[in-house]
Image (cartoon, grey):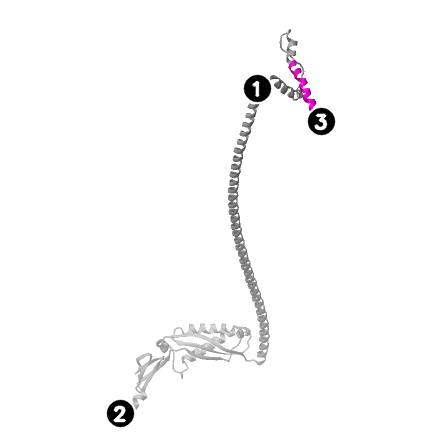
């Protein structure tokens, strides 16, 4: 009996993971609900319903009566991604029985296909093929408005394929699209070439600018180097000039000292010479004075004839530069001639003697 009970309990025991919302009914009433958990069901009176809370995908395949604005038949396959955000509301407002026609996934599928048909009917065939985003936005928007009160959220819609039913039209569209693609490819290539050229030009410009900047920097460094060299040369010149000036000043001081010494020596020499000359002159003057005194003494001792003789010797020298205009003889009228005679007679008395003296040298010469 125990074994049978264990087997019965094991067969009625159910465990649920956290990706589902479990609702346990007993006699039509909820006795337990929540994400994940466990439940033991009793036959005939218990029922368990499970609502998935993870993102679900519903496959759409709209093939019948999907027409473009040009009444061209097309086939659209897509996926709708949705999830339950309020399990209790979703369970109460939708059916989660997969066998029922009102099953939630069937509702989403039928609604999405209807939206696709309506959207494609208002679009040109080329736009349907090229602009899938318009269909995706329309389906997502309409489904969101439809299911927002069902405790559900439509996350997105993705179109897998759009196919033209008519083979000839499909071939023509394929050819047109191929031409368009080739055109786009050429445009892309031209655009890429233009972009490449622009980039090359930009790179060349940047390289040129960088080279110019490098050149300017090098030139600036060279200028700075030249300025530094010139500054060093200026300082060297200043040092040389200062050295030369100092040398000149030293030499000038030395020359001045030398000149001073020479001047002092010359002055000393001149003073010595002057003192010597003064002594010599003094001695000469003294000798001359002594000679004059001796001569005066001799003249004082000599007789009148010697004095008269000296006067006669000087007469030619005196009368050489003497111009006689008038002769004035002083004295009384009565004694005028006697005065002349008295003045001349002494000279006449020594004339013979002078004549003899003058003849003696002449005779000796003969």
Tell me if residue 177 is in the magenta stretch: no
Q: Earlier in the sequence, mark 2 or mark 3?
A: 2
Question: Residue at coordinates 53% horizontally, 33% vertically from top-left?
Answer: 276
Q: Residue 274's spot in the image, x, y percent? A: 53, 33
Residue identifier under label 1: 301
Is 179 situated left or right of 116 in this image? right
Residue identifier under label 3: 365
- In the structure shown, which secondary structural element does the residue marked by tag 3 occupy? helix
Q: Residue 9's spot in the image, x, y percent? A: 29, 88
Q: Residues within 10 Å of mark 2 (few under 14, many from 20)?
A: few
Q: Which mark is residue 2?
A: 2
- In the structure shown, which secondary structural element does the residue marked by tag 2 occupy? helix
Labels 2 and 3 touching (C-beta < 8 A): no
Q: Residue 91's spot in the image, x, y percent? A: 36, 78
- In the structure shown, which secondary structural element does the residue marked by tag 1 occupy? helix
Label count reads 3
Instruction: Tell me the CA gap for discs 3 and 1.
Output: 34 Å
Which of label 1 and label 2 is nearer to you?
A: 1
Give the magenta part as a residue range.
345-366
Residue 357 quadrant = top right
Q: Spot the residue most to the left.
A: 1
């Amino acid at each position: 009996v125990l074994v049978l009970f264990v087997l019965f309990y094991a067969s009625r025991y159910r465990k649920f993971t956290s990706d589902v919302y479990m609702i346990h009914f007993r006699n039509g009433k909820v006795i337990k609900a929540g994400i994940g958990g466990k439940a033991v069901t009793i036959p005939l009176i218990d029922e368990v319903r499970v609502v998935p809370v993870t993102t679900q995908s519903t496959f759409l395949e709209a093939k019948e009566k999907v027409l473009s604005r040009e009444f061209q038949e097309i086939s659209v396959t897509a996926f709708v991604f949705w999830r339950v955000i309020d399990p209790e509301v979703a369970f109460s407002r939708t059916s989660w029985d997969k066998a029922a026609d009102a099953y939630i996934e069937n509702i989403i599928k039928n609604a999405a296909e209807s939206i696709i048909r309506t959207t494609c009917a208002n679009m040109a065939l080329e736009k349907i093929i090229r602009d899938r985003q318009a269909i995706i936005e329309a389906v997502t928007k309409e489904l969101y408005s439809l299911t927002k009160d069902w405790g559900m959220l439509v996350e997105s819609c993705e179109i897998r394929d759009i196919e033209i039913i008519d083979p000839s039209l499909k071939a023509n569209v394929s050819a047109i699209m191929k031409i368009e693609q080739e055109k786009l490819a050429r445009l892309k290539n031209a655009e890429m070439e233009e972009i490449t050229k622009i980039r090359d030009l930009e790179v060349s410009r940047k390289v040129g600018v960088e080279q110019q900047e490098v050149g300017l920097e090098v030139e600036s460094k060279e200028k700075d180097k030249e300025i530094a060299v010139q500054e060093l040369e200026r300082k060297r010149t200043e040092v040389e000039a200062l050295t030369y000036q100092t040398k000149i000043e030293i030499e000038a001081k030395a020359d001045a000292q030398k000149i001073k010494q020479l001047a002092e020596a010359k002055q000393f020499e001149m003073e010595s010479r002057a003192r010597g000359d003064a002594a010599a002159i003094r001695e000469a003057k003294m000798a001359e004075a002594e000679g004059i005194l001796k001569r005066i003494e001799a003249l004082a001792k000599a007789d009148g004839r010697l004095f008269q003789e000296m006067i006669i010797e000087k007469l030619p020298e005196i009368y050489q530069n003497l111009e006689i205009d008038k002769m004035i003889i002083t004295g009384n009228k009565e004694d005028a001639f006697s005065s002349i005679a008295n003045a001349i007679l002494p000279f006449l008395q020594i004339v013979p003697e002078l004549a003899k003296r003058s003849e003696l040298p002449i005779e000796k010469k003969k």
